Image (spheres, rainbow, N blue to C red):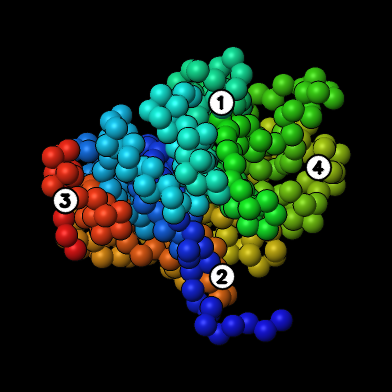
Amino acid sequence: MKTNSNNLFKDALSGIKVLDISNFLAGPVSSMFLGDYGAEVIKVEKPDLGDEIRYWGNNKNGVGLMYKLINRNKKSITADLRTKFGVKIIKKLIKNTDIIIENYRKGTLEKWGLSYKILSKINPSLIMIRITGFGQTGPNSNRPGFGTLAEGYAGFAAINGYEDRSPLLPGFGLADETSGLMGAFLALTALHERDRKSGIGQVVEFGIYEPLFTLLGPQVVDYDQLGIVQTRNGSRLPFTAPRNTYFTKDEKWVSISGSAQSTFERMCEALNISHLITDKRFLNNRLRIENSKVLDEALQKAIVKFDQSTLIKLFDEVGAAAAPCYNIKEIFEDKHFKSRNNIIAIDDQELGGQLKMQNVVGKFSRTPGRVKHAGPKLGQHNYEILVEMLGLNEKELEIHGYKLTQK
């Protein structure tokens, strides 16, 4: 198959137009992934305040750093969706939009006059991604929902932590981030169906708890078939052993997995505990799971004799699996992260210098993703989009309190 040279190194999703009217984390993460690969994303924020994620986490000189990451590659406009004028703006934008992403409580868009029924009459090919706490149907559908609630509701917290301690929530927005990934995937799935088959759009909706629930492993089949209720067991897994974090001689930590029989045997030989290979308690994976606590004690006793770097080098030499448990400072210093360009530096005028953030995930040979810019100032693209693109009157915009900044 011949490749058109004119298409080389162009953005994979160029020409796809996304309207992000969501806020906080799950919806904006979805549009971030789409924007990473070239979709044109217009983010709609509340006038004056903007998306509340601007005030989440740490800031530098009042500028929210989390916002800079999550809303990279997007253009920011302001519109109050609770007003007729704000609704008018959305309806104008919808005419040339492929995907709209929202994460308001059930019924909110309908109350504002922005239901899919109304918007699809303007643009029948429109795809609407609706992300809520519990989905659009079911007895909990009217309840407010955030990622923290989903992490408990989906069953994650119940299995996370140690058996003698309380359920442990993750140290980052796990449910929201997984929902962001799922939202981007489902948007592209619906886009593929529209462009390859029906030619018309549709609504795609899910609850924040659902992607995480799906990713939690074999809990459903185990309970259904065997009545097993998974409990908290530290860093151990219920389906393979050994698997844990271990303390090294230089007071650092390593994560180790012996999922394959050959890997477990190489690990034991490297640690000079080859007698464990023939121990009746550890002959295969199922036996090791049953005796995982005893196995971990034996491994820890052997591992603490080595420095972290020495242990990893030794494991690499024999083909066993180990990795350091890094903090973010150590990640910045790691040669592999640097060689893969996992962290990218970009110029940001608002912060007055360079800003480093996670790079786009995935290495494409022809159409790579890229970070073009960090999250914009609130309403930075009002003039470009509302005046130049939509043709709205400047005086009318100013009457309604819209701040306009020309390029």
Q: As shown in the figure, which amino acid type bears the numbered disc 1?
A: Gln
The quadrant of the image that shows the N terminus is bottom right
Q: Is residue 46 above or below residue 346?
A: above
Q: Label 4 belongs to which residue?
A: 285
Q: Is residue 263 left or right of residue 169?
A: right
Marks 1 and 2, how far apart in space? Answer: 36 Å
Q: As shown in the figure, which amino acid type bears the numbered disc 3?
A: Glu
Q: Position of residue 16 (x, y in %)?
A: 49, 59
Q: Within 10 Å of the Cα at label 4, are there few (<14), some (14-19), or many (20+) other Cα atoms?
A: many
* Residue lying at 52% horizontally and 41% vertically, measured from the top left: 120
Q: Is residue 330 above or below residue 239?
A: below
Mark toward the start of the polypeptide (3 vs 2): 2
Of tags 1 and 3, the one toward the viewer is 3
Helix, strand or loop at mark 1? loop
Q: Label 3 belongs to which residue?
A: 394
Asked if one can make out residue 76 in the rendered structure from this viewpoint, the answer is yes
